[in-house]
Amino acid sequence: QVQLVESGGGLVQTGGSLRLSCATSGLAFSRYAMGWFRQAPGKEREFVAAIGRSGTTIDYEDFAKGRFTISRDGAKNTVYLQMTSLKSEDAGVYYCAADPLLTVVVHTPEYWGQGTQVTVSS
């Protein structure tokens, strides 16, 4: 059974930082591209960042460039999202996702986590 379990969310002040983690199990981690999405209240879920199977190919949505960093650790079967300079509009539920293909994980990944809440206070 494939599981993606996010952690690291919480309450942070504007301008602060958080590191989200997504621990995976039940899949061959090295064979999957990984992604992060987010959903704010009343809005559709949107793509944040993705990383290819080897970790050398990375893609960010424009709002994440320069502030967010996605990375992966094959020894721990875990993908991370380091977020800095957080803004109020970054608040929402952040979801981890997995798919064998990077071109697919950015749109319709095969697997999803349950999400972790990020709250940004001013």
Image (tube, helix red, strand yellow):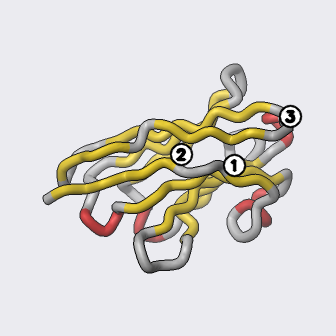
In the displayed structure, does residue 102 sit left or right of residue 119? right
Q: Is residue 65 above or below residue 45?
A: above
Identify the secondary structure beneath mark 2.
strand
- Tell me which residue sits at (79%, 65%) in the image: 104
Under mark 3, the amino acid is: Ala
Q: Residue at x 41, y 68 (%)?
A: 63
Percent across and percent down for residue 55 are 68, 41
Q: Nearer the viewer, mark 3 or mark 2?
A: 3
- On the image, the x and y values in percent for residue 120 come to 25, 56
Q: Is residue 117 left or right of residue 105?
A: left
Where does residue 86 sit, x and y in percent of width and height? 28, 55
Pointer 2 local density, CA inside 10 Å: few below 14, some 14–19, many at least 20:
many
Which mark is on residue 28? 3
Classed neighbour count for the residue bearing mark 3: other residues with Cα under 10 Å, few (<14), some (14–19), many (≥20) = few
- Which residue sits furthest left? 122
Give the quarter of the figure containing the C terminus: bottom left
Q: Give yes or no for contact between labels 3 and 2 (Cβ–Cβ under 8 Å).
A: no
Q: Amino acid at mark 1?
A: Met
Q: Give the mark nearest the N terminus, 2 or 1.
A: 1
Dot 1 corresponds to which residue?
A: 34
- Disc 2 marks which amino acid? Ile
Residue bearing the label numbered 2: 70
Q: CB of mark 2 within 8 Å of CB of mark 1?
A: yes
